Image (cartoon, grey):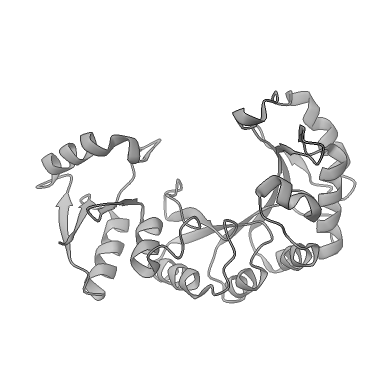
Amino acid sequence: MPYQFFSATGCTRCKMIKFFMDENNIAYEEQDIKSHGKEAFKVFYRENRPKIFRGKDGVEFPILFTGEKIFQGVGVILAFLMADDRLEGLVKTGTLTHGWINGLNICAKRLPDGKDFLCLLEFLKNQGLMIQLEADGRNFLLLETILKEKLINRLVFYLRGPAHLYEKITGMALDEDELNQSLSLLNSCFEYRIILPVSAFIRKNGKADYLSPGEAAMAAELVEKATGSKKHPFFIEPVVPQDKLNIAPLPPPAFFKYRTQCRRHMVLSEIVKA
């Protein structure tokens, strides 16, 4: 049975998916929601509304339905068509428009072989999209290749804290050497920013707590040492804690101490406004 493909007249990203499926002889049945497929999409939307992403401009197109799963957005659909589930978690429905694409990250899991991810980036770039990538220190060799081959236009580096806290904060350990190597690559990025999320996590004593200002400063110091510079676009981001942690959000004035501590090593540190 061919895939069901919901597109919209004039949608450039829909044309990208159609081009890829035609080039690779992938059978699909197109439903243009602005013409002959309008009623079909209404029915599909009613039946699957909780699973369909709506951004500030409405429903994100294109949408691909396999008969079992829904894939939405050009990046997510291409990841499935190119690599089945091998890129699961690394590509999400993007929120950027006007020629940009995001939702692409190399943080979610280890990629011993990043060929599938590189093929995805190459295709998106060749189609004329400007790419924003997220990283957090993992998959250093893949990030190095991506930057060397100039496959992205912007890098957002999520510095979770000092390396020894990564496992507590993210659930996955990260060796400090790999974090340093990844940070050192920032010197080669033409557009990037570093974001330090002030997250809550469970400490060794079993109690929920936030990354402290001192630990944030330790992370900022890592950037300074890895790059040899104090002048990076560095942003401290408040994070709403998970309900299960049963801990109150930090009040806005608390973040001034984080900024003061981080500016010892990152002089351009600023607080992200909620």
Q: Quadrant of residue 128?
A: bottom left
Q: Quadrant of the C terminus?
A: top right
Q: How many marks?
A: 0
- Residue for point 87% across, 37% down: 260
Outermost residue on the right side: it is 264
Q: Is residue 44 above or below residue 2?
A: above
| Residue toward you, 235 or 190 | 235
Instruction: Left or right? Give the position of 264 relative to 89.
Output: right
The x and y percentages for residue 229 are 84, 60
Q: Is residue 147 above or below residue 134?
A: below
- Residue for point 71% across, 68% down: 185
Instruction: Left or right? Give the position of 156 relative to 264.
Output: left
Does any portion of residue 131 appear in the rendered image?
yes
Does any portion of residue 233 appear in the rendered image?
no
The x and y percentages for residue 80 are 36, 62
Q: Quadrant of residue 179?
A: bottom right
Q: Quadrant of the N terminus?
A: bottom left
Outermost residue on the left side: it is 36
Instruction: Left or right? Give the position of 233 relative to 39.
Output: right
- Residue for point 24% across, 64% down: 18
The x and y percentages for residue 172 are 67, 55
The x and y percentages for residue 63 are 28, 51
